[in-house]
Amino acid sequence: MNKTIGMIYDQIRPEERLLIDSARRKSLRLNLHDAERIHVDLFDLEKKEPFEDVILQRCVSYFRSLHLTASLEKRGVIVINSSRIASICGNKLLTTLELAKAKIPTPRARLAFSVESALDALSNLGYPAVLKPVIGSWGRLVAPLKDVESAKAILEDRENMFPLYQVYYIQEMIQRPPRDIRCFIIGDAVVAAIYRYSPKDDWRTNTARGGAC
Ligand SMILES: Nc1ncnc2c1ncn2[C@@H]1O[C@H](COP(=O)(O)OP(=O)(O)OP(=O)(O)O)[C@@H](O)[C@H]1O
Ligand SMILES: [Mg+2]
């Protein structure tokens, strides 16, 4: 096979290096596209140049990757992952709905759109709970709601933020040790898993927040 595929990136991390090395080993031509140097004509739906038929989407930025993928798909480019998959996996609410539909157990969660209804949902779900932005990573703005008072204060704060942060996704707090387990799954198999321990000054276990793994 001597097809050329593309890879869009915004940072070359160890994972992208591995993909580049792997393509080289397999004698597969891999063209690299720096997302920050790309502009796409949204009305030019036929022409695929300078893009390949198949492109790996590796942007770290969720919004950049989603919008770029959708634009390329309209031109007939096969992008991995697709915009449909990316939008589900990058959104905690959409992910929860898919997992619930597939009967995969996850923490109980509620959705609300005002402080009052969020407090109602909380009295239903019980304290402590966790408030999360539906889109976000590295544990940013993932907040523990210990009781009604702290819930009111945190929700009031969110009312003054960008509208995305007023989509209240509230999850039951899992009673866990000061670590969690992150598993990487391919198909039906767990191919790797790590313990992630929270740092001294934070309850979250994200390595981006200083957690050890
Ligand atoms: N329901 C919960 N019960 C207990 N701990 C939680 C709960 N939800 C989140 N946490 C803690 O907060 C951290 C951040 O939460 P979550 O993974 O949902 O956010 P994220 O921003 O998507 O993070 P990442 O970028 O690692 O995916 C988790 O790693 C975990 O330590
Ligand atoms: Mg996440």
Image: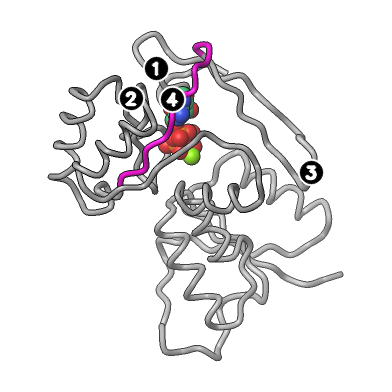
Q: Residues within 10 Å of mark 4 (few under 14, many from 20)?
A: some
Give the residues in magenta.
168-178
- Quarter the C terminus occupies: top right
For label 1, being within 8 Å of ligand 1 is answered: yes
Which amino acid does the dot numbered 2 rest on? Pro
Whichever of labels 3 and 4 marks the residue nearer the N terminus, that label is: 4
Residue drawn at (20%, 36%) of the image? 155
Residue drawn at (18%, 23%) of the image? 149
Counting from the top left corner in percent of width and height, residue 121 is at 32, 39
Which amino acid does the dot numbered 3 rest on? Asp
The residue that disc 2 covers is: 144
The residue that disc 3 covers is: 188
- Mark 1 to mark 3 CA distance (whole Å): 30 Å
Whichever of labels 1 and 2 marks the residue nearer the N terminus, that label is: 2
Residue drawn at (48%, 51%) of the image? 90
In terms of depth relative to the viewer, which is nearer, 87 or 132? 132
For label 3, being within 8 Å of ligand 2 is answered: no
- Mark 2 to mark 3 CA distance (whole Å): 32 Å
Q: Tell me how many marks there are.
A: 4
Q: Residues within 10 Å of mark 2 (few under 14, many from 20)?
A: many
Residue drawn at (42%, 13%) of the image? 199
Q: Residue furthest right?
A: 1
SS for tag 4?
loop
- Mark 1 to mark 4 CA distance (whole Å): 12 Å
Whichever of labels 2 and 4 marks the residue nearer the N terminus, that label is: 2
Q: Taking 133 as reference, is 122 above or below it?
A: above
The residue that disc 1 covers is: 203
Question: In this orientation, does residue 206 appear?
Answer: no
- Magenta-drawn stretch contains 169: yes
Of badges 2 and 4, the one in the foreground is: 4
* Coloring applied to the structure: one colour
